[in-house]
Amino acid sequence: MKLNQKQIQHIANLARLELTEEELKKYSNQLSDILSYINQLKEADTTN
């Protein structure tokens, strides 16, 4: 799942964080990578 900067800004506002444009770009990529990894984990076979 790819998050855009608008979504990151919304999350930051909910957390009452003030982020710079540079931080928005950085966190957009980082959170997108984390969510992609979580999706991979969800698809892993966990039987047995």
Image (cartoon, grey):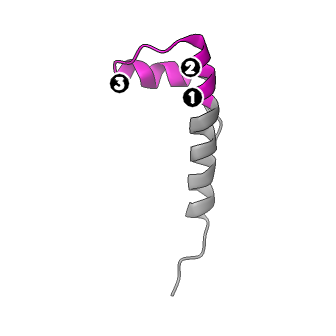
Circle 3: element type: loop
Task: Judge by depth and name the residue closer to the eye, 24 or 48.
Answer: 24
Q: Which of 22 and 42 lies nearest the eye of the viewer?
A: 22
Q: In front of the other: label 3 or label 1?
A: 1
**Residue pictured at 56% horizontal, 54% vertical:** 38
Which mark identifies residue 36?
Answer: none
Which is more toward the observer, 42 or 31? 31
For this view, does 23 lie left or right of residue 13? right
Residue at mark 1: 27
Q: Which residue is mark 2?
A: 23
Q: Answer with the quarter of the image where residue 31 lies.
A: top right
Residue placed most toward the observer, 23 or 32: 23
Residues at badges 3 and 2 in contact (C-beta under 8 Å)? no
Circle 1 SS class: helix
Confirm or deny contact between disc 2 and disc 1 (CB under 8 A). yes
Tell me where the magenta segment starts and ends, as one range: 6-28
Amino acid, disc 2 = Glu
Q: Disc 3 vs disc 1: Cβ atoms closer than 8 Å?
A: no
Which residue is disc 3 drawn over? 15
Q: CA distance from mark 3 to mark 1?
A: 14 Å
Kind of residue indicated by mark 3:
Ala
Q: Main secondary structure of the magenta part?
A: helix
Mark 3 closeness class: few <14, some 14–19, many ≥20 residues within 10 Å: few
First in sequence: mark 3 or mark 2? 3
